Image (cartoon, rainbow, N blue to C red):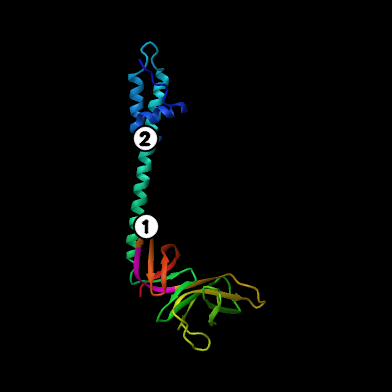
Amino acid sequence: MSTISNISGSSNTSQFSSITGSDTLGKEDFLTLLVAQLQNQDPMNPSDPTEFTAQLAQYSSLEQLMSVNENIEGLASTSQNQQQLSALGLIGREVTVDTGAFQLGDSDVTLGYQLDAKADRVELHVQDSRGNSLAVVKPADMTAGSHFVTWDGTNSKGIPIAQGDYTLSVLALDANEDGISSQPLIKGQVTGVDLDGSQSTLVTNCGSYSLSNVKSIREL
């Protein structure tokens, strides 16, 4: 009579593969091998009850782990669906994002900046993809906090800048010309939501942004 050796040993990988046709041990495969071991054991040398109990415990642990994994996957799917539904609810709202990337279209853009401390000089630089400064806005409010200005899309000479993708950078200095920590902000109205993959992207009148970039939400 043929005998199947201890299924918990690493030497049984080839036996397992030949029986199941896979290198991955699932709970059904585990139970199949366990039953096969009992059916083919040597009656003159039966399996050790202690070892058999340990194998049953392994099966129980495997089943519990797979159940936990299925529950986690279900929670992740539910969380993703809730995030997408929440994103759809933002259509028509005004959002502020903590990034300097934006798109210039045929309307004004609301540029923002956040200062960690009071500044003596603040400049908002609109830069192209090469880092060239195409327009400089000098806001009046230099107190600590978040502030916004409306930019009409023209340079210092009043000449309109071509529509496209740009980046806002902030220069903030104190009275000693030392830099002050600052953050560029963009404010726009949500016009749509792209539900691609696991991420929800907000489409606004000044660009597309991930939900993770949203700093604040307001009703218009």
Magenta span contains residue 193:
yes
Asked if residue 90 is positioned above or below residue 20 in the image, the reply reads below
What's the residue at 39%, 18% (across, down)?
Answer: 49
Nearest the eye: 42 or 209:
42
Q: Position of residue 158 (x, y in %)?
A: 49, 88
Query: Which x, y percent locates residue 154?
Result: 48, 85
What amino acid type is highlighted by mark number 2?
Answer: Gly
Instruction: Identify the residue at horizontal 34%, vertical 48% (top origin).
Output: 74
Residue 168: tell me if it is visible: yes
Q: What quarter of the picture does the C terminus occupy?
A: bottom left
Residue matched to label 1: 197
Q: Amino acid at mark 1?
A: Gly
User: In this picture, is 197 found above or below 160?
Assistant: above
Residue 174 in the image: above or below residue 63:
below
Residue 26: mark: 2
Q: In the rendered image, which quarter is residue 190 located in?
A: bottom left
Q: Quadrant of the N terminus?
A: top left
Q: Secondary structure at mark 2?
A: loop
- Is 141 in front, or is 171? 171
Residue 157 position, x and y percent, is 52, 89
Q: What is the residue that sits farthest to the top in this orientation?
A: 44
Q: Which mark is residue 63?
A: none
* Residues at circles 1 and 2 in contact by the CB criterion of under 8 Å: no
The residue nearer to you, when weighing 41 against 70, is 41
User: Is residue 46 one of those drawn in magenta?
Assistant: no
Magenta residues, start to end: 187-194
